[in-house]
Image: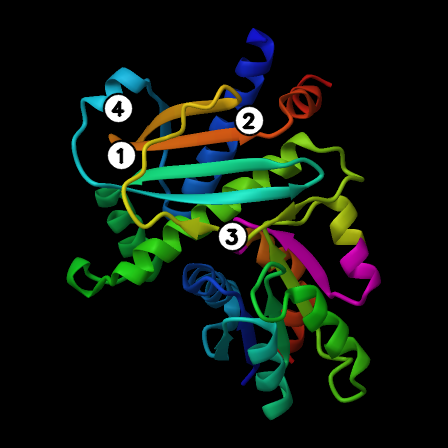
Amino acid sequence: MEEFNQKLQEKISSVLGETLENMAFLGVDDSSKEEIEEITGKRLSVTLLVTKPLLLEMRLEMDEELLLQVVETVYTIDRDEITPKQVEDLLAETLNTLAGLFMTEVLPEDQTFSLNLPEVNEEESEPSNEAGSHKFYYLADELPVIVELTSADKDALATLLTD
Amino acid sequence: MKRIVIADDSSTARMMIRRCLEIVGLMDAEFAEAENGKEALALVKQEPTDLLVSDLNMPVMDGEALLKWVKASPKLTDMPVLIITSAGNPAKSQELLDMGAFSVVNKPVNPAILSEVLTPFLESEED
């Protein structure tokens, strides 16, 4: 079980790092629930379902200030020109990219996968407390990023990661 | 001047792809953007297009259906279609290449990867 959690965290750290580095030259540091809880500020979240070959929900939560910084970099625009739609789109595209990289990392080369379109959560939502849920906490530019995975079939995910 | 159509439901992805294409030497290209495969198909039918860049997961018409339509059309079949997707792995990439895609690139896209896969296209730009 410990090996599974460690491998899962390694994969998530790697794909999150690659995603934010490519999008906005941002580095990512591991953090903890306690450290993240001390940082105030509005956060936005998005959810995406992996539907094949296993059912997996991925949720990404990012600090709004961090999202604004990334939008400024990606779109090369000033802060006062940014629209809420651009912020939400960037959050959704970040999770879409992260989920694709994660599935490519964990699946065998001959195994295809399917992702649903990401859905931005309308209100600040708390990460779930389901038994099959795994949450990982990070800091990017000292601002919070949380990645959560909930698998409908925990054994299938564990098998992929430990094979 | 080259005409390039970029199809992706994410404006962030379209912007990132366009920036990368500009960096690899297509600064002077004419870019047209579509939010889904249906819009992209209309754009490439409207005017001769040198390169179609498409995501896979899109509402209304996805990238796979768009690729099928393009390759089935005698007028469009020679147009290179570059797929840039988050849902691609070696198995899916091969499937798309067999369907006629020019190349398949995984997100996150960056200029180095695009420069590599677009070398033949960029060389024809220099001619």
Chain that bears disc 2: A
Q: Are marks 2 and 1 in contact (CB under 8 Å)?
A: no
The local crowd at label 3, few if under 14, some if 14 to 19, many if 20 or more residues have their Cα within 10 Å, is: some
Give percent across and percent down for residue A144.
Answer: 28, 31
Residue at the spot 66% in from the left edge and 21% down from the top edge:
A161
| Label 2 vs 4, first from the N-terminus | 2
- Tag shown at residue A11: 2
Residue at 32 percent across and 60 percent down: it is A86
Q: Nearer the viewer, mark 4 or mark 1?
A: 4
Amino acid type, mark 1: Asp
Residue B6 appears in which quarter of the rendering? Answer: bottom right
The amino acid pointed to by label 2 is: Lys
Residue at 52 percent across and 49 percent down: it is B108
Residue designated by label 4: A36
Foreground residue among A125 and A97: A125
How many residues crowd mark 2 within 10 Å: few (<14), some (14–19), many (20+)? Answer: some
CA separation, marks 2 and 4? 20 Å
- Confirm whether residue B47 shows in the render: no
- Above or below, A97 relative to A32: below
Residue A101 at x, y percent in the picture: 58, 40
The tag earlier along the polypeptide, 4 or 1, is 4
Q: Closer to the observer: label 2 or label 3?
A: 2
Query: Which numbered dot is residue A141?
Result: 1
Q: CB of mark 2 within 8 Å of CB of mark 3?
A: no
Residue span colored magenta: B95-111
The reply to the same-chain question for discs 2 and 4 is yes
For disc 1, the chain is A
Image point (38%, 57%), residue name:
A89
**Which mark lies nearer to you, 2 or 1?**
2
Instruction: State which tag comes first along the sequence, 2 or 1.
Output: 2
- Relative to residue A59, is residue A79 drawn left or right? left
Give the CA separation, mark 2 to mark 3.
21 Å
